[in-house]
Amino acid sequence: MEEIAPGIFMIHVPLPHNPLRELNAYLLRGKPGEKDLLVDLGFNLDECEDALRAALAEVGGGAGFDIVLTHLHIDHAGLLPRFLTRDRLVYSGAIPGPMLRLWEEMSDPESGLQFLTKNGVPPEMLKAGRVPREFRTDWKEILARGQFRELREGRLLACGGYEWRCLETDGHCDGHICLYEPNARLLIAGDHVLGHISPQISCYEVGSASSLNKYLHSLDKVAALEVRLVLPGHREPLTDCRARVAELQTHHMKRLEEIRRILSRGPQTGLAVTEQMTWAINPDSDRAFLMQQRFFALGETLAHINYLIETGTAEMTEKGGLLYYGLK
Ligand SMILES: [Zn+2]
């Protein structure tokens, strides 16, 4: 743990067996008598809980803390059920229904996972893609039990002399938020802007608004800010926010170009397109992990295809229960 700005502590929460290695949670210490804010939590695992509780015991104030979730992915919000109490508020962006529905389906061994089947995923791969038991999250139960407060664009959160402004930054997932402090020029970025890693952009419903389009808009929003230090959800803080945003924009433009080239060979399923693309995958990864990566890769591919559809370059047709994508 380190104090990276006065009263702002970065807590390294281990993410066992995961290439992200760690989640960065942030404790924003309140003034005496004021609650602290804890930003993001980790997986629903003992290792994550122990690391967080140890850090809170070391630096937390006496008035307790409320929770802010930059988004509802399990490496950030999975641990929430263990931290819910009656008097603890949970701030989050808008709750993304389609994403929660897909998570629910992936956790249900009986579900047919129609969305994935239609995109060419065969039954044996579906089985491997089920969410492992320890990562299953019953969002209905959590939403009913937690004292949720929605943070929307421009909403202010005061803590420890800082005034954090909420930015809605859909893209990495719907309902993603960043917190910006204009005086200290700090940006708590969640997974919107990461160094070294390109934040995953996914797709849960083809034909819905393209998450890549949303992501690119959200990057423009962040590029317009004066930022001295980006506090990301993974890996080290970044000092040059604009340069990193530019790199991410270029990365997605290249991906779109690659997919356009693949689609020029004729209409194909989402999985077929995914398997022709180049992915940076660690060859030492185990089988289960590789399978999981194929799902992430498919989501990423569909998000880009969806962007091409939305901007009039590609089209989707349905044949024999499968979706095919081609150039217009
Ligand atoms: Zn993350």
Image (cartoon, helix red, strand yellow):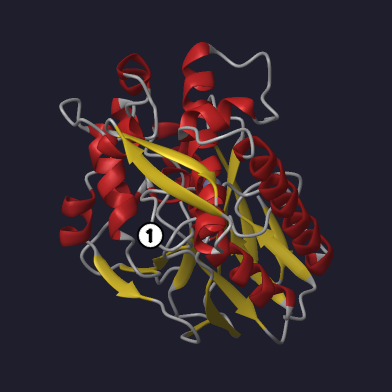
Q: Position of residue 281 (x, y in %)?
A: 66, 25
- How many numbered callouts? 1
Q: Residues within 10 Å of mark 1 (few under 14, many from 20)?
A: few
Residue 43 vs 163, above or below: the answer is above
Who's the residue at 60% across and 39% down the image? 263
For the point 55% across and 34% down, the residue is 297
Q: Is residue 27 visible?
A: no
Whether residue 133 appears in this view of the structure is: yes
Camera-nearest residue between 74 and 275: 275
Q: Is residue 318 above or below residue 249?
A: above
Q: Quadrant of residue 286?
A: top right
Q: Nearer the viewer, residue 186 or 307?
A: 307
Query: Where's residue 138, x and y in %?
Result: 22, 45
In the image shown, does 95 or 219 lie closer to the viewer? 219
The type of residue carrying mark 1 is: Ser
- Residue holding disc 1: 208
Disc 1 residue lies near ligand 1 with CB under 8 A: no
Q: Is residue 61 left or right of residue 187?
A: left
